[in-house]
Amino acid sequence: AVSAHFLTMLRVRLLARPVVTRVPSLVGRAPARLCSSGIHDDFKPQTKAYANPEKSVHDQIKEDIEREKVVVYMKGVPEAPMCGFSNTVVQVLKAEGVPFKGYNVLADPDLRDGIKTFSAWPTIPQVYVGGEFIGGCDTTMEMYKSGELSQMLKDAGAK
């Protein structure tokens, strides 16, 4: 076993040593380029266009909610929600046992703004069942607790 005295002496010796023994002089040298005017593609924000260039975002949203029985416009994706409210909605829909389509509004600023104007609802997530906007996280939770959501999902043929 290592004695306490040995550990204390080792600590004293390590702390007594200077961290930097020599600082190279920068006098007479060209300054290093610390910043680049360009950003490598790997570090640029990654976004992808949600809407087809031939359609408006509103047209694409309308098409999506008519095609899918349950749609969630959320921050992140169902497998990895990026906010607590989106996560709550995902967990509620999973508890109901229904398949749903999630769209990540963080991937496309046009979608993020477009869904808010489409529904006239200012917050994300937004849940659509059977083509009808039911609300955000709070509304979805209230409907889940009351049993209204389960019935709506059955009526829409999602359950």
Image: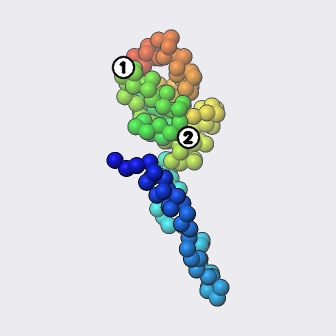
For this view, does 66 lie left or right of residue 135? left
Q: Nearer the viewer, residue 32 or 85?
A: 32
**Residue extending farthest left:** 1
Q: Assess disc 2: are there few (<14), some (14-19) or many (≥20) residues with their C-alpha within 10 Å of its C-alpha.
A: some
- In the rendered image, residue 43, in percent from the top left (x then y), is placed at 50, 61
Mark 2: amino acid:
His
Does 19 appear above or below 95? below
At 44% from the left and 13% from the top, the residue drawn is: 151
Q: Nearer the viewer, residue 14 or 98?
A: 14
Q: Does residue 56 appear in the picture of this structure?
A: no
At 59% from the left and 76% from the top, the residue drawn is: 23
Q: Are marks 1 and 2 in contact (CB under 8 Å)?
A: no
- In the rendered image, residue 82, in percent from the top left (x then y), is placed at 50, 39
Does 40 appear above or below 121? below
At 50% from the left and 13% from the top, the residue drawn is: 145
Q: Which callout, 1 or 2, points to the residue nearer the camera? A: 1
**Residue extending farthest bottom:** 28
Q: Label 1 vs label 2: CA separation?
A: 27 Å
**SS type, badge 1:** loop
Mark 1: amino acid:
Lys
- In the rendered image, residue 111, in percent from the top left (x then y), is placed at 55, 44
Q: Which residue is mark 2?
A: 58
Q: Which residue is mark 1?
A: 159
Give the image quarter of residue 113. top right
- In the rendered image, residue 72, in percent from the top left (x then y), is placed at 48, 32
Q: Quadrant of the C terminus?
A: top left
**SS type, badge 2:** helix
Q: Nearer the viewer, residue 59 or 38?
A: 38
Does 59 appear above or below 7? above
At 57% from the left and 38% from the top, the residue drawn is: 115
Q: Nearer the viewer, residue 104 or 30?
A: 30
Q: Assess disc 1: are there few (<14), some (14-19) or many (≥20) residues with their C-alpha within 10 Å of its C-alpha.
A: some
